[in-house]
Image (cartoon, grey):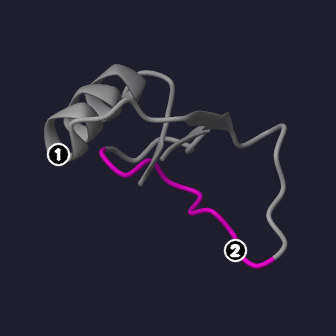
Amino acid sequence: MYCVCKPCIEFALERFVDEYEDAPDVVDLKETSFSDWDPPLQCHFCEQLAQYLVV
């Protein structure tokens, strides 16, 4: 699972497929809320604001 910014989404998708050998789901963090989990504010790969959850 990766929380990523828009510029890093492609890298996260490639890394997920390499690791799990399956296509991930991509969730827009602006349009989704979680009752028991707060997503990180920063991208997993850089310092920008996380916008997507790759899971």
Q: Nearer the viewer, residue 8 or 20?
A: 20
Residue at which label 1 appears: 19
Q: Secondary structure at mark 1?
A: helix
Residue at 84%, 56% in the rendered image = 33
Quadrant that contains the N terminus: bottom left
Q: Quadrant of residue 16?
A: top left
x, y percentage for residue 12?
32, 34
Magenta-drawn segment: 36-45
* Amino acid found under the numbered disc labelled 1: Glu
In the image: residue 39, left or right of residue 18: right
Say whether residue 38 is magenta: yes
Looking at the rendered structure, which numbered label has been put on residue 37? 2
Say whether residue 21 is magenta: no
* Amino acid found under the numbered disc labelled 2: Trp
Residue at 36%, 28% in the rendered image = 8
In the image: residue 25, left or right of residue 17: right
**Is the C-beta separation of discs 2 and 1 under 8 Å?**
no
x, y percentage for residue 25?
53, 35
Crowding at mark 1 (Cα within 10 Å: few <14, some 14-19, many 20+): few
x, y percentage for residue 37?
70, 74
* Magenta part, dominant SS: loop
Q: CA distance from mark 2 to mark 1?
A: 23 Å
Q: Secondary structure at mark 2?
A: loop
Residue at 59%, 58% in the rendered image = 41
